[in-house]
């Protein structure tokens, strides 16, 4: 039996050697043949050179190098496409996904009723408070309006059967949100909880705005509720405008003072204009996703592989 280990990398020159060393200890405790697929996602440091050296020393270590930075979602997709193992796991090179958990994950997945063993952080120790707060808010929103239920704190780090991986690969969409795709395909998944682990070295490439954009993409990819909200806002605005029109006509007939109320009228116009622009923005986001899908561009471009 073979285990494929998929590791997306972006500027991970300091962590890759530490990751390989940590995994070598886990290999001794599992009755599996290991293959490693590192994806160099347009790194600007020495990550690619380190992967080349690792491949020369160990033929089971493979790498794909993108022509530029395409993002983690593209890297994950490329790794899943290249994986040949009976089991497949997705891990970060910074060791925030503890390799030792693979031992317990493998033990659990031996149950024929289980198709995937995921991991879930029970806390976000070490993260900025605002990031943790927005992360919790995202899961509350997506689980209220989304098509699938996502587990708060769930990581991409999971051990999957070949059948589940093949099902994910059938989803060839350009706009990918892997956390949602893992859940959307179904299959029985159990979670292992663990305390948050900080990066072993280097700095994260994720910032607050990047995570916020990623969250918005997740909501749009797995829910059409924002469109329904835009429709509702349009209907409410129209109703308010009709009521206001009747009010103005009646007040003019009774009071004969059509000039008074200019400031309030301007405020109403600005309010309605803001609602219209917001609704157009929501609709435009969905149209933009459709636009990217219809182009049929590749999810990634490989410059070098071994």
Image: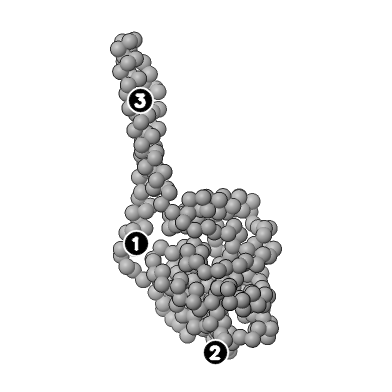
Q: Is residue 88 above or below residue 193?
A: below
Measured Cα–Cα span from mark 3 to mark 2: 74 Å
Residue 178 visible in rendering: no
First in sequence: mark 3 vs mark 1? 3
Quarter of the image with the N terminus in it: bottom right
Seen at 69% across and 83% down, the residue is 29
- Residue 243, disc: 3
Q: Is residue 149 visible?
A: yes
Foreground: disc 3 or disc 1: 3
Instruction: Give coordinates of residue 122: x percent, y percent.
Output: 67, 60
- At horizontal 44% and vertical 54% (from top left) the residue drawn is 223
| Among the two numbered marks 1 and 2 on one chain, the one whose residue lies closer to the N terminus | 2
Q: Nearer the viewer, residue 305 or 156?
A: 156
Q: Is there CB contact under 8 Å for labels 3 and 1? A: no
Q: Residue furthest top?
A: 255
Q: Position of residue 50 (x, y in %)?
A: 56, 80
- In the image: residue 250, left or right of residue 85: left
Q: Residue at x 52, y 69 (%)?
A: 187
Residue on which disc 2 sits? 59
- Residue holding disc 1: 292
* 14 lies above or below 33: above
Tell me residue 2's x, y (percent).
56, 85
Left or right of 231, for residue 25: right
């Amino acid at each position: 039996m073979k285990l494929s280990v998929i590791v997306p990398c972006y500027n991970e020159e300091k962590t890759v050697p530490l990751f390989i060393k940590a995994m070598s200890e886990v290999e001794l405790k599992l009755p599996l043949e290991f293959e490693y697929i590192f994806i160099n996602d347009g790194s600007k440091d020495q990550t690619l050179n380190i992967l080349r050296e690792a491949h020369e020393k160990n033929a089971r270590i493979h790498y794909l190098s993108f022509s530029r930075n395409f993002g983690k979602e593209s890297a994950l997709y490329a790794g899943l496409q290249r994986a040949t193992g009976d089991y497949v796991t997705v891990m970060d090179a910074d060791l925030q996904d503890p390799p030792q958990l693979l031992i317990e994950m493998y033990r659990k997945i031996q149950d024929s009723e289980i198709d995937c063993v995921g991991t879930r952080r029970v806390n976000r120790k070490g993260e900025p408070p605002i990031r943790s707060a927005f992360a919790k808010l995202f899961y509350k929103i997506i689980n209220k309006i989304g098509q699938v239920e996502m587990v708060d704190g769930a990581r991409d780090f999971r051990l999957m059967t070949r059948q589940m991986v093949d099902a994910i690969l059938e989803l060839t969409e350009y706009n990918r949100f892997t956390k949602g795709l893992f859940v959307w395909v179904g299959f029985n998944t159990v979670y292992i909880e663990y305390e948050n682990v900080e990066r072993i070295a280097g700095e994260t490439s994720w910032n607050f705005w990047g995570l916020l954009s990623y969250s918005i993409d997740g909501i749009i990819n797995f829910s059409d509720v924002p469109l329904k909200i835009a429709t509702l806002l349009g209907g409410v605005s129209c109703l308010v405008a009709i009521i206001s029109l009747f009010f103005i006509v009646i007040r003019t007939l009774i009071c004969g003072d059509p000039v008074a109320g200019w400031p309030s009228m301007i405020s109403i116009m600005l309010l309605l204009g803001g609602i219209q622009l917001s609704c157009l923005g929501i609709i435009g986001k969905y149209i933009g996703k459709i636009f990217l899908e219809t182009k049929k561009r590749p999810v990634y471009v490989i410059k070098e592989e071994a």
